Structures are given as structure tokens and as C-alpha cells.
Amino acid sequence: MRFVYSDRHMLHDPKTEVQIGVAQAMHETPSRAEAIREALVADGGFTIEEPTEHGVGPIHAVHEPAMVRYLEDAWHEWEAASGAPEMIPDTVLHPALREGMAAASEPRFPLARLGYWCFETMTPVVPGTYEAARAAVDVALTTADLVLGGEPAAYGLCRPPGHHAPRAAFGGYCYLNNAAITAQYVAERSGEPVAILDVDYHHGNGTQQIFHARGDVLYVSLHGHPDRAYPYFLGYEDETGTGEGAGANLNLPLPTGCDDALYLDAIERALEAIAAFGGSTVIVSLGLDTYRRDPICDLALTTPAYHEIGRRVAALGRRLVILQEGGYYVPDLGENVREWLRGAGGSA
Ligand code: Q9C
Ligand code: ZN
């Protein structure tokens, strides 16, 4: 299988996130992507490729251009205004603040501007963030190009990840929504409906939001139930889409400790929904934070399950654009991705 990688991900290397009210070491690290690259190269069955430039057009097709402009400016503005080495908001635009009033407009004060676009405290901006996030989008779109060009499946080693970023905000370790940008790109180029299968532990609130009113893009997610799991405010079963998107969103929340057998049952439900939807391409948001040893999640999947999940997804008979999202147990991350992709590629 061909896979796309850019070393520019290393430009994004924040040290600290504030999680559960505690400043702690960042979990979303450059070592994650390096571990995956090394495992795939060592396997011998994968061919590594550089991304090509796709420009900002496909990003603006999904995200608010003012947010993209902000991400591009943010570090320079911050550097001039603050001595802090990483940007984390202290005040975010809670919807109740202006209840009954007109929507806020983008403020000018640097810390206020950060709290206008960023929705939480785990997603710092550092000097290389924008360049790395743009490279991740190019990785994703180059992977889509491979599949549009005839490959049955290809993998994009995106970092930073993307599925938590809605149209007009960033958070959840994500800045630009690689999978959503790619789904839109494939829908435009193929003229066909596109399905997104999100198997990251966390609900992909950003992807769901972007396509919630769209009937031509199906979003299906398996994730830790939002009654205990980030992003908490989305991911419930009754979120099924709105307007023309009614019926084109399927959430399958999972209990604490969910094991291989229970997960595979849920995958069958997800695959039935995708099989019933049109189109020849599936975008996979591939997170390995469902793993039993993941440090920030609570499912219990084993390494062999990833091979089986990849195999079953490929058995749909659709083309697969497989894009990296989360997964934080670095010692086994490369092996878990490798197994998933070998399953999807028909290797033992
Ligand atoms: N108290 C991805 O996996 N924080 N993002 C969870 C737990 C991490 C995860 C909070 C949420 C972001 C792409
Ligand atoms: Zn995740």
C-alpha cells in the first residue's frame, strides 16, 4: 500500500496541554508519527511518498476563511503581545455569554482572538503549528489523489489530526479537519456521495458539524459515549443529521472497557449503514486510541482486532482513503496502524 508522509509535522511540537485542570505533557507528540512511519517502512509492504501542494482552496471549501487566516497569523501576533511560549486560551466564547444578543464579531486583542477561535485548553498553537497543519492537509489530499487515480486504498499519515475541528473553531489536538477537507474534495471531484467512517476513540465532532445538514456526505462514528468521553457535548445517538442531511449521521457510542467482540458488532452496524449509502469512496478517520493500553482512553481493543477491523472495512468493496487521527500509546502505535492497514490491504 502507498502512504503519504511529510516531515513538516515535526514543526508542531507543543510541550504542555491543560487536561482535567492539570498542566501535563502533551500526548499528541511528533514521536507518534515517527513511530508509525518507522513501522510501515520496516514492514516492507508500504511505499512512502511526499505530499504535493494543494493550496488553501480545498481548506476554504470546508473551514471559515477567517479562522484559517487567524491560524496563519496567530503566532506572530502572540509573540508581539505575550511572553508565553505556547498559546492556550484562558477565556473562550461560551454561547451563553451573548445569549439573546447578536453573535460576537472577531475581537482584536490577541488573547481574546485566541478564545474566539479555540474551544478548549489541550490544543496549543506554537510557531510551527500552521505550517504543520497545512502539511497534514496536503498529506490527506495527496492520499485522496492516489485513490482517485485508481489505488484501491491509500494511507495518509496526517499530523496534527483533524476530526475535532468544526467549520469555524479548533481544538482536540486538531486545527484543520483533514478528513472533512478530503471528503469535500473527493465529493467535488468524483461527483458522487462520500462516506466517512470515524474509528478514533473520540467522537469526531468537527466532521459531524461540517456535514450535519448535507445529504451527500455520510458520517458514521464509533466512540466512547459522550456521557463520559471528550468531546462531551456531541456524539449522542439521537444526532442523526438535519435538513437534507437527515439520516446521514450515525453515532455508535460505546461503553467503558468495550472489548474486541463488542467493537466488531458495532463495526458491523457502521458498515451496514455505509453499504446502504451510495458512492465508491470511504474516508476513514483512523484513531488507535481505542487500544487497551491507551493512556487517555478507556476501551480495551487488542492488536489483532485492528487487522480484523481493517479487513472488514476493506470487504465493503469501496475505495479507502485512510487518514491518521489519534492514538497515544506510542510503543505499540506503529504496530497497530500497520496491522490495520495490512488487514485493509489483504495481507495476513
Ligand atoms: N479528560 C484526538 O484523539 N483530551 N484528539 C481528552 C480527557 C484529549 C483527542 C480529555 C482529546 C483530544 C484526535
Ligand atoms: Zn481520539
Image: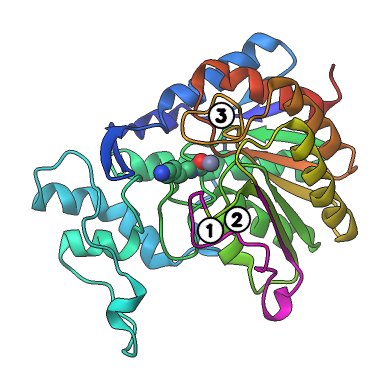
Residue 147: image location, x then y, percent: 76, 41
Q: Mark number for residue 48?
A: none
> Disc count in the image?
3
Q: Which residue is mark 1?
A: 206
What is the quadrant of residue 183 in the picture? bottom right
Q: Determine the secondary structure under disc 1.
A: helix
Residue 132: image location, x then y, percent: 41, 39
On the picture, is 337 further left or further right than 51? right
Question: Which residue sits at x=59%, y=51%?
Answer: 225
Q: Nearer the viewer, mark 2 or mark 3?
A: 2
Q: Which residue is mark 3?
A: 5
Find out whether residue 253 is within the magenta segment: yes
Q: Which residue is mark 2?
A: 180
Q: Residues within 10 Å of mark 1 (few under 14, many from 20)?
A: many
Q: Nearer the viewer, mark 1 or mark 3?
A: 1
Q: Are marks 1 and 2 in contact (CB under 8 Å)?
A: yes
Specify whether tag 1 is near ligand 1 (CB below 8 Å).
no
Quarter holding the N terminus is top right
Range of residues picked out in magenta? 228-254
Residue type at mark 2: give it: Ala
Q: Give the mark nearest the N terminus, 1 or 2.
A: 2
Q: Give the mark nearest the N terminus, 2 or 3.
A: 3
Residue type at mark 3: give it: Tyr
Residue type at mark 1: give it: Gly
Question: Which residue sits at x=67%, y=29%?
Answer: 301
Residue 91: image location, x then y, percent: 22, 62
Q: Residues within 10 Å of mark 2 (few under 14, many from 20)?
A: many
On the picture, is 255 further left or further right than 320? left
Q: Give the mark nearest the N terminus, 1 or 3.
A: 3
